[in-house]
Every structure is written in C-alpha cells, then in structure tokens.
Image: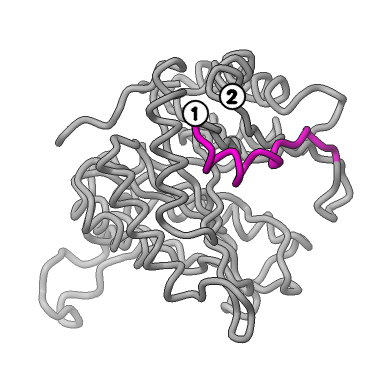
Amino acid sequence: MKKLGFLSFGHYALPGQQGPGAKQTFQDTVEIAKRADAIGVNGAYVRVHHFAPQIASPIALLSAMAAVTRNIEVGTGVLDMRYANPLQLAEDIATLDLLSDERVALGVSRGSPEPADKGWQAFGYAAEADNGADLARRHFERFMSALRGEGVATSAPLEQQYPRMYRPGIPLPVMPHSPGADRRIWWGAGSFDSAEQAARDGVNLMSSTLISEADGSSLGELQARQIERYRTVWAEAGHDWTPRVSVSRSVFPIVDDASRRMFGMQASSEQIGSLGEGRQVTFGKTYAAEPDEIIAQLQADPAIQAADTLMLTIPNQFGVDLNVKILADFAEHIAPELGWEPAKER
C-alpha cells in the first residue's frame, strides 16, 4: 500500500429525518477533503447513487473539493455509467482534470442495485439487459473513446459551419482534451470477470467493498485472486503503462478514550449475503481496535498487500471533526507501517 484515501458514501437525511441534510453533507465532504489534504491523504472519493439520499451528481462536488485542495486526488467510487451522458462526462472530466492539475481519479462501473425500477430510463436511456449492463458498456466505451481524444462526430459542410474551423467530413473530438486523463479512470469491479475486462480495457482497478464470489475465503483472499487475474490479463493485453489497484476497508483506530467510546463496539466479522441479483457475495469486516492490532490484521490481508491504494470508508453522517480524526489517527498510527507515502506538494 502506497496511497491512502477516504471513500464517502454521502448519506444524508431527508426533510423530517434526524441528521445532516444534503446541503450540510456536501459542504462537510468538501471540508473533510480540505483537511485530509493537509494531513497528506492521497485521495478523496465519493460513492454515487441515483434516486436515493446520497451523492447523485458528483462533478460539482469534485470540483468544489479540487478548488480547496492542492495535492489530494478527487474522484468517485463509483459513478454509474448507465446514467451518464458519455460525451458530456468526457468534457466534464477533461475540464476538471485540467483545472485540478491532473488530480482526477474517476471510478466508474455498471452500477449497483438501486431503489428505482430501471431508473436509467427516466434519464432517457434504454437497455436490453434487466440490469442495464449492455447500456453501461456502450456508455463506457464511448466515454473512453471521447476522453482519449478520438473523433466522435463529423464536421459539417463548410457553408453550414459557424465558426468555419474544419475541413468538411472529418472526425471531431469533444473538447477540451486532457492528455493522460484516460489513465486516471478506474473500473469498479465486483467480480473476477469484471476485473479481467477492466484489464483488457486498459483502465485501473477499483476493487469493491464486496465481491460477487463466495467460497468461504476471506474478502482479502478473494480480492487478492481478483487482483492477480487482473494483472495477468493486463500483461497479456500488452498495455505500455503500469495501472493502479485499490481496495476499500472500514477501519476505526482506537487511540484514546474518545475513540474507544465511539468505536469500541464497532468491530464486525465478514459476511456472505445477497444484493438481490441472484448470487452470493462476500462483504468485508469492520476493523475497530488499537493500532498494533489493526496493523497486524491489515498486514495479513493479501489484497491490501497486493494493492497500491487503500480507501477508508468513512461514516460521513458523523460530521467533519470525527471523520478527520479517523483519517488523522490512521495516518499517524497505522498507515506508515503499511508503506504509506503521503501526498507530495505539487
């Protein structure tokens, strides 16, 4: 593990419910990113869900985080490609990447089960597969083509152009273009097969907080096999650069009486369950212990040892100070023993 980030699920309370609402949650996320940047944390990532009280349109939020930070990368974990206009997303990401000095780390995927029945249809998109996998694939391929600067439209006859910029009939890319932004895209893989496809596609691997395999092995063991298969296929594909790999964990360091009162009973074991898609999945555990014990547990986790980036899932509803304390305690007491390299001043 070289890099440390936080992953916020962005939960907020609806009117009439207890807890921070959408406005406070978004503002808190920006402030957590700002303070995490001062600590040297390498990444600030947000989960994206539609038709739910969570972050749904992340580009504005990522832009706000980038505007108040200098070194931390900003991104998603993950954005649902079934809902995305691929060409507009390519324009948005290139713009943000240029504004942030190449600090975008966008995680995308097919998306997870959701409250809406084929909610992407309300956004104007159609799919043949019940889960929209074919739609996500089409959008992803078009997005990557646009982000790489390939032509996605054709120039009009000269007399129809305003302003007159191009020879008629030539391929036109979207603008702006941020060279190398395509190498900062991650696929959120929840299975072995999706990890192998990510390798063929030439994008980084963001291994999920769960995995759609369940044979009794631990999440770390399953993800380590997933990462190994990803890297094998990557090498076979002949890509000319080295990709990054991330895993996520829920970790609460207990370093004082305050953290003991708050997190002393939070530790949990791994579970096998279902997301309602007809297959068993392995859910990760929650770590809550003193630093030496957590260090030993994480050092024994083969996926953390295989990955270069660890994302800590944070309880964003608990506010800025508590979440910054979790990150600061982890950075001070645990991360150095795992090989962490704090973000460098740009």
Q: Determine whether, in the image, residue 210 is placed left or right of residue 146.
A: right
| Residue reaching furthest to the left | 164
Q: Nearer the viewer, residue 250 or 71?
A: 250
Q: Determine whether, in the image, residue 121 is placed left or right of residue 183.
A: right
Q: Secondary structure at mark 2?
A: helix
Residue 139 visible in the snapshot = no
The percent coordinates of residue 108 (x first, y second) are 52, 50
- Give the residue drawn at x 61%, y 76%: 18
Question: Which residue position holds label 1?
Answer: 245
Q: Is residue 5 above or below residue 294?
A: below
The percent coordinates of residue 274 (x first, y second) are 85, 48
Q: Label 1 amino acid? A: Val
Specify the label residue 128 is tagged with: none
The percent coordinates of residue 181 (x first, y second) are 31, 44
Q: Label 2 amino acid? A: Tyr
Q: Quadrant of the N terminus?
A: top left
Confirm or deny contact between disc 1 and disc 2 (CB under 8 A).
yes
Q: Nearer the viewer, residue 253 or 225?
A: 253
- Give the residue drawn at x 43%, y 63%: 58
Q: How many marks?
A: 2
Q: Is residue 261 magenta?
A: yes
Which circle, 1 or 2, is nearer the viewer? Answer: 1
Q: What residue range appears in magenta?
A: 256-272
Residue 176: image quadrant is: bottom left
Question: Which residue position holds label 2?
Answer: 230
Q: Quadrant of the C terminus?
A: top left
Q: Determine whether, in the image, residue 344 is placed left or right of residue 259.
A: left
Q: Secondary structure at mark 1?
A: strand
The percent coordinates of residue 68 (x first, y second) are 22, 56
Marks 1 and 2, how far apart in space? 9 Å
Q: Is residue 118 magenta?
A: no
